Image: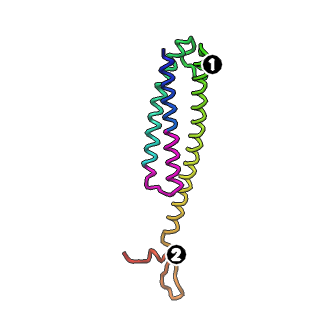
Amino acid sequence: MAIHDLSAQLWHERELLDLLTFKLEEEQLLLTSGKTRWLSHATREVEQVLERLSAAGLARAVTAAAVAHEWGLPDESTLKDLAAGAPDAPWAELLSAHLKAMTDQTSLIRQLRDANAQFLRAASRSTQETLAETQPGAKTYDSHGRSERLAGARFFDQDL
């Protein structure tokens, strides 16, 4: 029966959602600690989990269509539709539990994603401000007509 395959695929997808949550939290820890050296690695790992989730979602859609066909439901039935149209109460409860767990996990992932994006924007803004402050100052002239840099630019006055 395809329902057994679908249940196994849903468990696998939930494990991938847990892994994605972990990777996003790991990324957030790097951002908040200022350890941006490893940020590209963390981001790459998030992308790899997202690719695996995409493949798992496609496999689930195919299997869900087979379950829907077996149960006399439209092939494009959602997980919610399958739970509502399940011929046995245990399958309805199991599919509903999967749906709830995946919905809750997805909500948490959205929150982490949004928080990480906010941290990245703040870090980018801070870097831009720091770079702007270290740029050589404009030149001006003193009372004797000699050229001098404005205050704060002495760091760059050294001959290299």
Q: Is residue 93 above or below residue 153?
A: above
Q: Which range is magenta?
A: 19-40
> Which amino acid type is shown beneath numbered disc 2?
Gly
Is 83 or 46 nearer to us in this picture?
Answer: 83
Residue drawn at x 49%, y 44% is 23
Per the image, label 2 sits on a secondary structure element best described as loop
> Measured from the top left, where is residue 47 in percent x and y?
45, 41
**What residue does disc 2 label?**
152
- The quadrant holding residue 91 is top right
Is 134 or 87 nearer to us in this picture?
Answer: 87
**What residue does disc 1 label?**
84
Residue drawn at x 48%, y 35% is 16
Residue at the extreme left of the image, as rendered:
160
- Specify whether residue 28 is painted magenta: yes
Q: Is residue 17 above or below residue 98?
A: below
Colour basis: rainbow
> Measured from the top left, where is residue 119 in percent x and y?
56, 52
